[in-house]
Amino acid sequence: ALSFVHNIVSHTREKITSNKQDVRKLIHSAKVGIALVLVSLLYLLDPLYDQVGDNAMWAIMTVVVIFEFYAGATLGKGLNRGIGTILGGGLGCLAAYIAQEVGGTGNSIIIAISVFIFGAGATYTRLVPKIKKRHDYGLMIFILTFNLVAVSGLRAEKVLEIARERLSTIGMGFAVCVFISLVVFPTWASDELHDSTASKFQDLAESLQGCMEDYFRLANEKENEPSASSFSSCKSVLNSKAKDELLANFAKWEPWHGKFGLYYPWGKYLKLGELLRELAASLVSLKHCLQSPRQPSTTLRQSIKEQCEEVGCSLAWSLRELGDSIKKMRKCQQAELIAPKVKAMRVELSSAVSANSKLGQTENIDALAVASFVFLLMEVVEKVQVLAKE
Amino acid sequence: ALSFVHNIVSHTREKITSNKQDVRKLIHSAKVGIALVLVSLLYLLDPLYDQVGDNAMWAIMTVVVIFEFYAGATLGKGLNRGIGTILGGGLGCLAAYIAQEVGGTGNSIIIAISVFIFGAGATYTRLVPKIKKRHDYGLMIFILTFNLVAVSGLRAEKVLEIARERLSTIGMGFAVCVFISLVVFPTWASDELHDSTASKFQDLAESLQGCMEDYFRLANEKENEPSASSFSSCKSVLNSKAKDELLANFAKWEPWHGKFGLYYPWGKYLKLGELLRELAASLVSLKHCLQSPRQPSTTLRQSIKEQCEEVGCSLAWSLRELGDSIKKMRKCQQAELIAPKVKAMRVELSSAVSANSKLGQTENIDALAVASFVFLLMEVVEKVQVLAKE
């Protein structure tokens, strides 16, 4: 019955989150549509078109390319694009100017060589992991602008004017994007990172409990169907590194807002994520014991049932408590409660093991794995105590 | 001494791979530079410029945006760009035509509405995970082209001609990219996926051995400094999901080449990666036992030393063998050898445990964890036997 309630709870939670995600996606789509219409007005309204002419194209291009789901991603791409355009345009002008000074067929050769050098150099820089993370897009725009300006500089005499006009239309596109992305129902990557970290605690607590239940339900009913649902949430925590890093990367671009104030704890979130993944790894290997064909006899399992269930419950409780305290961004008042609890759990477990010390092989693997959890959890608790000080 | 040799081996291996990576990066950069110069010739050579005019810009843009590190990524982006441009251009022409038929101020309104609907719709589609994976870029280009064509269709009378010219220059850029990316020193994502899968086996074997050594060296010397190097390679396996999926995604775009023939086992690589990650999770939790402050007494550890080391060695041997067989793409002849070996290991472990059944808590956690490895490894062996049939 308990596991049934759990299933319902987790399903409802999933539905709510997925609905929320859907609404956010719809809002984002509408925002992009509005931004596109606004920027299209540069073409559609005669007085505006007289001002910018065909360069309005660049504003549209900017909006399409820059507008991302998270506000931080939009800002980061926009700033990268701006800097890349200015640098590339400047260097391109310089190259075109030098080539024109040389004159003759020499100028084409100079342009070709500079295109090769800057193109290859910037491409190599893009492959450096650290730069790739933050400035990949900016470097791409740099290559693009440099090439266009340097190459067309030979044809068009008024390169500078073209550059000025394009830059101003790109600026308009950027302004529209930033305004709509940051002011109208903004989707902050930092909030997402915060929420996903908190919900990871819940997920782990749930899958820990599910695991315990399976183990002793198996003992009772000899049914061999461990609930896969709690397992998958555990695995998604395990595979969350890439997503977390992406979010933290976006969050770094985001300005001061809401509950975070001027304090930027993204590094701590990443560290916490790392610890949670380690915990998830332990849970996964605990689950493998569950699925192993060599199961201990029922009576053996029954003999450790009580202590293990107790420990499992209080572990899950501690995880939930920590997740809550992160969610609400308050110092974890329960942290002092958790530390002695963990101590009690250890005692409990060692008594469970010593009472059964003459048992065979597999029956206390569960208890032993739980014992290693406890140790791991201690670490998490310590880490969270650091975080809770924020 | 053994661990010292191991360190040197793994360091050399690392250096060779990183040098190889560096060379590949340099080659890639040079390739991009050459492609850019080739496409710039459209501007630089007078007879070519007379043909295409300012539309040469689009060829440059295509090369800059499309050319990616892996051949598969370049192809995928190029095809996405082509399809997105054609679809967006077609629908944009249609919208512009309808708007012109209506005439008056009505046409601006119709254009604005269609821009909003298609922009928002395509943006929403981009957020669907499955489509995002493969066609994110194509949808972005669709939005861009649709907007540009629909909006400028009101101004320029000869939309169709412009579209034709742009499409042909984009085609030129695409051709240059594909030729250089696929013919000149191609970097295949499929090869990368293959090699990284094979080297994961090696990494796990190494970290398993490192772990065993640490455990019994600690027993001997009571030094508390587990080697962090083997731990990090284990963790990188654990966090490899995102990269694997990216590579498999690129590999799907790649045409027939080299050793893979017409057989595309990308799904199997992903499955294998999943199993390897599970194994890595077990290894990580095994390592936590190592770092736990509650270490069993030296004599207790000594009593299980022999059996554990033997099992560790043969496990590492099996992993290496499997990795080799994948690397060389031959059916694993050792597979038949491994299965009985695993059985022998089990017997060994249970004897180790039963001989020490009265021991306390932590000293056989190692052996028990290894026992669960054995089970896991059995699964991997079975999986590899499936894979080896290719």
Image (tube, coloured by chain):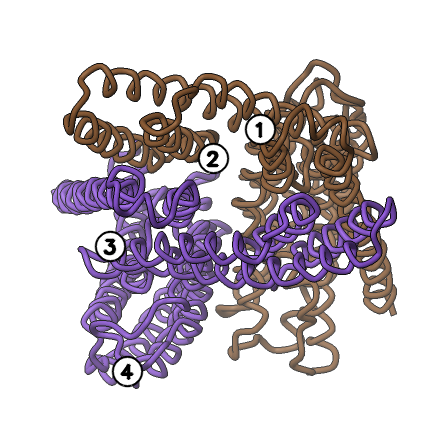
Chain colours: A purple, B brown
Chain under label 2?
B
Instruction: Examine the rendered structure and indicate whether residue A361 appears above or below residue B262.
Output: below
- Residue drawn at (82%, 63%) of the image: B11
| Residue B370 appears in the figure | no
Q: Distance between the residues labelled 1 and 3?
A: 31 Å
Q: How far apart are marks 1 and 2 (CA)?
A: 9 Å
Q: SS of the residue at dot 3?
A: helix
Q: Residue A180 carries which label?
A: 3
Q: Name the residue under label 4.
A: A340
Closer to us: B200 or A285? B200
| On-image quarter of the N terminus of chain B | bottom right
Q: Residue B137 carries which label?
A: 2
Chain under label 3?
A
Tell me where residue A92 sits by quadrant: bottom right
Q: How far apart are marks 4 and 3 (CA)?
A: 50 Å
Looking at the picture, which amino acid does disc 2 mark?
Tyr
Question: Sequence order check: which comes first, mark 1 or mark 2?
Answer: 1
Q: SS of the residue at dot 4?
A: helix
Looking at the picture, which amino acid does disc 4 mark?
Pro
Q: Are marks 4 and 2 on the same chain?
A: no
Q: Are marks 1 and 3 on the same chain?
A: no
| On-image quarter of the C terminus of chain B | top right
Between circles 1 and 3, the one closer to the viewer is 3
Q: Do labels 1 and 2 share a chain?
A: yes
Q: How many numbered circles are shown?
A: 4
Q: Where is residue B315 in the image (x, y as percent from the top left)?
A: 71, 46
Question: Sequence order check: which comes first, mark 4 or mark 3?
Answer: 3
- Residue drawn at (20%, 79%) of the image: A330
Disc 1 vs disc 2: Cβ atoms closer than 8 Å? yes
Q: Name the residue under label 1.
A: B76
Looking at the picture, which amino acid does disc 1 mark?
Gly
